[in-house]
Image (spheres, rainbow, N blue to C red):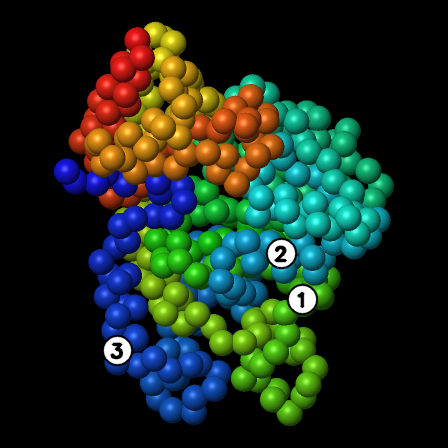
Amino acid sequence: MNNIYLDNGATSFPKPKEVADAVYEYMTNCGCNINRGGYQSAYDVEGIVFETRDMLREMFKAEDCKNVVFTKNITESLNIVLKGFLQRGDHVLTSSIEHNAVMRPLVQLQKKGLEFDRIPADENGVMQLDAVEGMIKPNTKAIVVASASNVFGTINPIAELGRICNAHGIRFIVDSAQTAGALPIDMEAMNIDVLCFTGHKGLLGPQGIGGFILKEDMISLIDPIISGGTGSISHSEEIPDFMPDRFEAGTMNIPGIIGLHEGLLWIKNKGLDNIYEHEMSLTKRFLEGIYPLAEEGLIRIVGLPGIEGRTGVVSVQTLKKDCATAAFELDCEYGIQTRVGLHCAPHAHMTFGTYPTGTIRFSFGNFNSEEDVDTAIEALSKISADYK
């Protein structure tokens, strides 16, 4: 039995062969640091790191590649930004379908005097945009949202939120984990002040690499919460005030950046439109294939009924069987690898009425095929049929 990987919302797999090859080449034939080594191979690697920053600048239409900061993941990025920017007495708006990468820092800061409110959503997780302006307070400092739900695939209205922020002088911070590498993101056009990204999902890099991108006027407003050696101005014990060193202390994940570099090249050659079209074609095929199960009352398809306004993520509840049991059977009996539970987003499940049992999440990626989808439909049908 061959495994069919349908958990791309957690991390993309497989990666392009070029990603693994580049990491192996670096680890076996170079392995050096940058900003430290005064020799040619270190300078060569530094050139790849610079090029990766510039590729990210180009992809997200950012102002300057020096404002691309590398971290180990998007969770670290959000923690650095939120805890370095927000202060006691500030107010923040977020969505009602957020991942804990946003919510846990906000709740932690709430205990220190931060206020936040959740923008409501309808039964499909679609944000009620007309409620936003009425929720803005005199002390509202930022809107912080994910570009799309990791649980149900619902895409948030990023461009519209950016316009509201711009009109009210509010900063806009976006978690792009579920859309970067599949949907276009334009920091300038969408009025995004801080874009946080992770490398191991749609950007096709390895785990352990992520980052954030700042608009120029945000740099001095965020207090670095991590400090240490940067390889620059080593005569001083003060944190550098220039980018990216202001936020990049310690040894960088060079293998991760090199892998991300190759993932970005693969995406550029493939084309965002082609990637999204492929994922949506698979999602549409899957939704249409499982509709009969929903009509029979065997499963519940959670979220938007079609592909409009969603990513390649579909969550379902098995109504006649515990979701965890069903996911276990999908794996053991059919090799279908999914994610089950609350997906680190409890309030999203509260919004959809799937808390506390959670859902089974099917998430499609670049290397899935129509045959994979058909096998998943058949497997879900058989598991559901056990309890007709």
Q: Which mark is residue 225?
A: 1
Residue 290 point in image, percent of width and height: 31, 18
Mark 3–mark 1 Cα distance, whole angstroms, equals 34 Å
Mark closer to the chain start, 3 or 1: 3
Q: Residue at x 67, y 66 (%)?
A: 225
State the CA–CA distance, disc 2 to disc 3: 33 Å
Evaluate whether residue 264 shows in this view: no
Q: In the structure shown, which secondary structural element does the residue marked by tag 1 occupy? A: loop
Secondary element at tag 2:
helix
> Can you identify the residue that label 2 sits on?
79
Image quarter hosting the N terminus: top left
Q: Is residue 255 left or right of residue 66?
A: left
Residue 38: % across, % down: 43, 91
Q: What amino acid type should be assigned to the residue bearing mark 3?
A: Thr
Residue contact between numbered discs 1 and 2, judged by CB atoms under 8 Å: yes
Q: Secondary structure at mark 3?
A: helix
Single out the residue that lies furthest toward the left: 1
What residue appears at the point 61 percent right and 46 percent down from the top-left corner? 102
The residue that disc 3 covers is: 28
Q: Quadrant of residue 360?
A: top left
Question: Label 1 is placed on what type of residue?
Answer: Ile
- The residue under label 2 is which amino acid type? Asn
Q: Residues within 10 Å of mark 1 (few under 14, many from 20)?
A: few
* Marker count (numbered): 3
Considering only order in the chain, which callout, 3 or 2, is on the residue closer to the N terminus? Answer: 3
Nearer to the camera, 111 or 153:
111
Q: Position of residue 81 (x, y in %)?
A: 64, 57
Q: Quadrant of residue 385?
A: top left
